[in-house]
Image: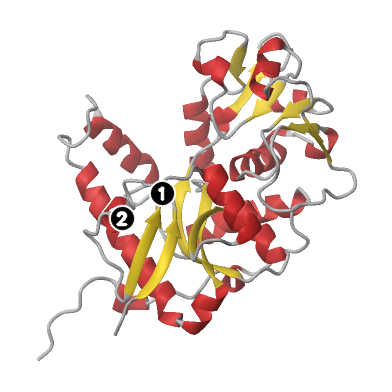
Amino acid sequence: MAKLRLTVACGAYDIVKPLIEGTVEADGLDLVFLTDMGPRERHWRMGRKHEFDVCEENVGAYYMIRDQGEPLTAIPVFLHRRLRHGFVFINTAAGIREPKDLNGKVVGGTNFQPASNIWMRGILEEHYGLQHRSITWLVERSEDVAFEPPPGLRIEMNKSGKTLSQMLADGDIPAMISPTLPKPFVEGDKRIARLFADYKQVEIDYFAKTGIFPIMHVTTLKQEIAEKYPWAATNLTKAFEEAKQLAYRRIANPRMAPLVFVRTAGEEQERIFGKDPWAYGLTPANRKNLETVQRYAYQQGMIRKIAPLDELFADTDLGDVGSGAAPEEF
């Protein structure tokens, strides 16, 4: 039987490379990987045009796509996670000492929909007293998914002729929440600082308190494929899991990474986050994670209703028959 050919748009991460390079194969599937796009282009092309069969997609954009009735589903494979307290930046002369000082201000944010921004707006509101609808959100890019802000949510396009990063450095805006490090900050501009100076410890404390290592991206699948070939979602998930486990074993070898303290870093990660920080599946921890960011998207006016996760993700759970190679039976 010929294999089912699927295009897969995703990042070329170490946890995916065994699949990309063919060391791991998905049973019954011929996967054509498209990895040259950055996340911005990939998310926009999937969010607006549904160009790919399988796509690593911003979790917030996926919730919006489903809320708008588009024919996509997802598998519980989460290729990108990141703690984001270290991506809130302030102008050092703006008098911002704590998150609630941002209330009533103009805050930059590339665009409104990145998962990083959804998470940090939600975390700052839930844990630090931010009131996101008191803020004017200044953006500089179009959104991945067509979106009409609800009444009371102020989103304005930057028309200054400067980038938001430069506006932050020049003091035109007091703060910025960004998926990436602002260029002036990377270049050592002392006019920009992190809101959370000891961000690593703040992020560790957040994980210890909540158990959440924020999911940034989900893996979407066209609904027509999931319906016509119901086995494809499960086989994809199994293959992604096998690739990740191979990557873990490779990274555990200190000879493979040009880092002096790579073993120490790995031990620290395991001590804080456990053996599988990039866990797949709708585990209790992942459900809490996904439900939290869905709640934030709802509170921020991006979706109209909270949908059950079991309606948003294909059923790929194999129970105890999927826990490794089956023993020989005679």
- Residue 179, placed above or below residue 7: above
Whether residue 292 is visible here, answered yes or no, is: no
What residue is rendered at 74% in x and 20% in y?
Answer: 161
Q: Secondary structure at mark 2?
A: helix
**Residue at which label 2 appears:** 20
The quarter holding residue 330 reads bottom left
**Residue at which label 1 appears:** 35
Locate residue 245, reporting x and y percent: 27, 56
Which label is found at residue 183?
A: none
Q: Secondary structure at mark 1?
A: loop
Classify 10 Å Cα crowding around label 1: few (below 14), some (14-19), many (20 and above).
some
In the rendered structure, are the residues bearing label 2 and label 1 in contact, judged by CB atoms less than 8 Å apart? Answer: yes
What residue is rendered at 45% in x and 81% in y?
Answer: 229
Classify 10 Å Cα crowding around label 2: few (below 14), some (14-19), many (20 and above).
many
Closer-to-camera residue (111/76): 111
What residue is rendered at 57% in x and 50% in y?
Answer: 43
